[in-house]
Amino acid sequence: MTQLFFIMLCFIFLILLSRYSIVEKQVRIDLYLTIPQDKKELNPHPDMRDILIQKLMIKEYQRDKKDFLLFKKCDVEIGYNNNGHFQHLASTCFNQDGYLEGIQLSQIPRRTDYLYLLVTLGNKELGYITNSKNYPYTYKIRIPIKSKTIKIKQVFLTSFSLHYNKQVALAQRAALRALNYYVEVVEDQKNCIEMAQKLLNDQREIRFSPINIVFEKGFEKNQGNGFYRKGYKQAQNPNIVIRDKDNFTNTYLKGNIVHEWAHWTMYQAIGHHKMATGSYESHDSYNSDFGVSYKEGWAQFQTMRYLYQYGLSKKNITWVQTQKTEDGIPLLGLSTNNTVRGVLLDLYGVKNDTTLFEITSPFMSGLINLKKQDQLAEGLLYLAMVDSQASDLSELLVFIKKMYIKTPEQQKKFVNLLKINGLNEDGTFNDSKTDH
């Protein structure tokens, strides 16, 4: 009887043990199977999704797709329409090449079909293109969402699809073109300076402060453009004003942006007290203030150099002053804007007369292509303008002579450059010819 009872207990124990093992095994299996295969199951908001903007470029055009403009260096707010309200997702900026890249956006409703880009023409490091009331131009651009990743590299949008009003569309396009030129001018200046600094082993970081450009179709038409140290009208900071004109051209717009930008960079380099403030009658007129001739001649040179670069014709680059005063006195060598421009063009010297000193000549070992020579010459002249702290042409020439004239041959060419432009051997204007 006792043995039978013992056998029964053992049998019951084996059954229980077997059941426990099965349950434990089952639990382990169940735990394994509850690990989701799809990450969506972990999303606490199943009605939301994430979007990656891998690479996106917006090309704005009017009629011809080849004549497109980019939103380079533009601030952009990205969001979506949430019951009639803009729901902000991210703040970023188009890069130098006009791309948005690697922008991760989270928590976007699955029902959302479009992203909206609120684009401002410019950014805080560059400055903005503004209207006459100092408000930056803005665009609202709609981008369709078709997948988790926006892989579109280029999107073409017409001026009129961005603005239904034709006049507004044309005005906005002109402002966008001004921005494209502005970005190109600043980047070109930086590249030239970096090339010269590399050659000179100059480790300084030269930075440009931001400045806004006021440009509006129809604004103060046919009046002069300007760089305003204290800001134009209601502006609180220095700004540049480019005015509209009847025979408006893209070359006019680009050239005047370069001209006024040259004033701004000189102002930053030498300061308010050293940079002349006077006005002038014309680029050929005599200036009793030598500083006016210097600042205006510098800006003129920058305009010609940027517009034509190494394509400057020999006629332009070897130009000398041939005009005369009202009294019949030749202006050659006198204090005029064009006298300074002519000297700087000779120093720049790309495609120039080899009998004159060129600022790149001490560094020309072997052949160098014209594009690099152009950039090097511009960079060296810019650094000379900064480091000399010159307030007139003669001070700049004294600095260049000290820094770059190393051989008798270079000295001979330098004197020849002064002579052909009518200057004295010490680089001063030949004002002894006039009683002005």
Image: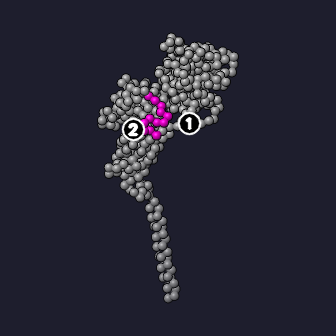
x and y percent of residue 315 in the render?
51, 14
Position of residue 356 in the picture relative to residue 60 (left or right): right
Q: Is residue 420 magenta?
A: no
Whichever of labels 2 and 1 marks the residue nearer the N terminus, that label is 2
Q: Label 1 belongs to which residue?
A: 207
Q: Residue at x 69, y 16 (%)?
A: 408
Q: Give percent across and percent down for residue 224.
A: 43, 27
Range covered by the magenta-colored residues: 225-236
Mark 2 is surrounded, within 10 Å at the Cα level, by few (under 14), some (14 to 19) or many (20 or more) other residues, namely few
Q: Which mark is residue 435?
A: none
Badge 2 marks a residue whose secondary structure is: loop
Judging by the rendered image, the residue that carries numbered circle 2 is: 133
Q: Which of these two is toward me, 323 or 374?
A: 323
Q: Amino acid at mark 1?
A: Arg
Q: Main secondary structure of the magenta part?
A: loop
Q: Nearer the viewer, residue 300 or 98?
A: 300
In depth, the one of 29 and 147 nearer the eye is: 147
Callout 2 amino acid = Lys
Question: Mark 2 to mark 1: distance in Å?
Answer: 28 Å
Which image quadrant: the C terminus? top right
Task: Check the image and report above or below for 169 versus 411.
Answer: below
Q: Secondary structure at mark 1?
A: loop
Q: Is residue 230 magenta?
A: yes
Q: Residue furthest left?
A: 165
Instruction: Identify the residue at image location x=55%, y=25%.
Output: 291
Q: Position of residue 401 (x, y in %)?
A: 65, 22
Q: Residue at x 54, y 32 (%)?
A: 267
